[in-house]
Amino acid sequence: MHIYLLDIFAFAVFITCWFGYTLFARKKAKTTDCIARSLHQNRIHWMTQMLSHELRVGEASLLANLERNIAFFASTTLLVLAGVLALFGQVEKLADILESIPFAQSSLTFAIQIKLALLGCIFVMAFFQFTWSMRQYGFVNVMIGAAPYDKSGTNENLKKYAKQVAVVQDQAAHAYNYGLRSYYFSLAAICWFLSPSALMIASILVVYTLYKREFTSKAVTAITAGMHYLDIERDKAASKDSSKG
């Protein structure tokens, strides 16, 4: 009974870490420089610049590259999910393998099936996120194709349209990020096969890793600084246009 209670507590910690960090990151991104916030500003600048391009081959190539990466993860997720489902038929062999691992807690076949079911649910969620991201990038392609050519760059309605294109692209990127985050937490869930303590420690380490990469990494600093320089150049161009007018 003590072991089962520890498993329940470890699962609660796992869920709290995952969804708690998701809510925390979403709220903190509104007021703090991070990858999501900085890239959103870059996407707005990108889509605004897109309106001044009569031929948008560059935009199409960049979006195709993004979609190709997501398609890779979506197809890989199906293969991983198939492997997890296949393990349901080898539960007894899996239990024997786990017992041979040092420091691994022995588990009943029913407990192993629950842990496999958790992994299956995680990869199903990841697949839904990746495919939704792919669809939204398709919507971005349609919106770019529908955008008229604006050589002057002074049409306010088209600037607002560009921001809406950036919002759709931002949502596609968020779905892709959620899919990748599922992979991170699936690695923590695998540690549950060893022991509940391993699951809790791995969950906390995943949250720490995600926080470092999304909020305090060198990439965040570079992207934020780069956006700052773009804003300076854009302000200079705007001031030149106003002086000419």
Image (cartoon, rainbow, N blue to C red):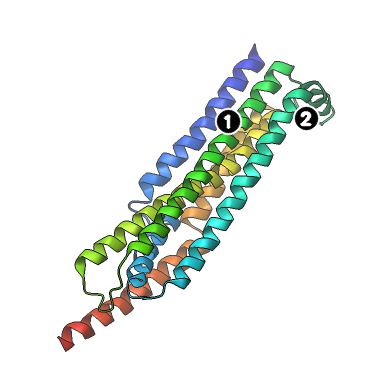
x then y, percent, for residue 22? 45, 41
Q: Secondary structure at mark 2?
A: loop
Camera-nearest residue between 61 and 212: 61
x then y, percent, for residue 194? 72, 30
Mark with earlier residue (2, 1): 2
x then y, percent, for residue 91? 77, 23
Q: Give the side of residue 177 with respect to residue 99, left or right.
A: left
For disc 2, the marked residue is: 103
Residue 176 seen: yes
169 is higher (above) or lower (below) than 159: above
x then y, percent, for residue 109? 74, 18
| Kind of residue at disc 1 | Cys
35 is higher (above) or lower (below) than 191: below
Determine which quarter of the picture holds residue 34.
bottom left
Camera-nearest residue between 76 and 30: 76
Q: Residues within 10 Å of mark 2 (few under 14, many from 20)?
A: few
Q: Work out which quarter of the rendered image holds the N terminus and state it.
A: top right
Q: Residue at the far bottom: name it.
A: 244
Camera-nearest residue between 7 and 163: 163
Say the numbered circle drawn on residue 121: 1
Q: Residue at the far left: name it.
A: 245
Q: CA distance from mark 2 to mark 1?
A: 26 Å
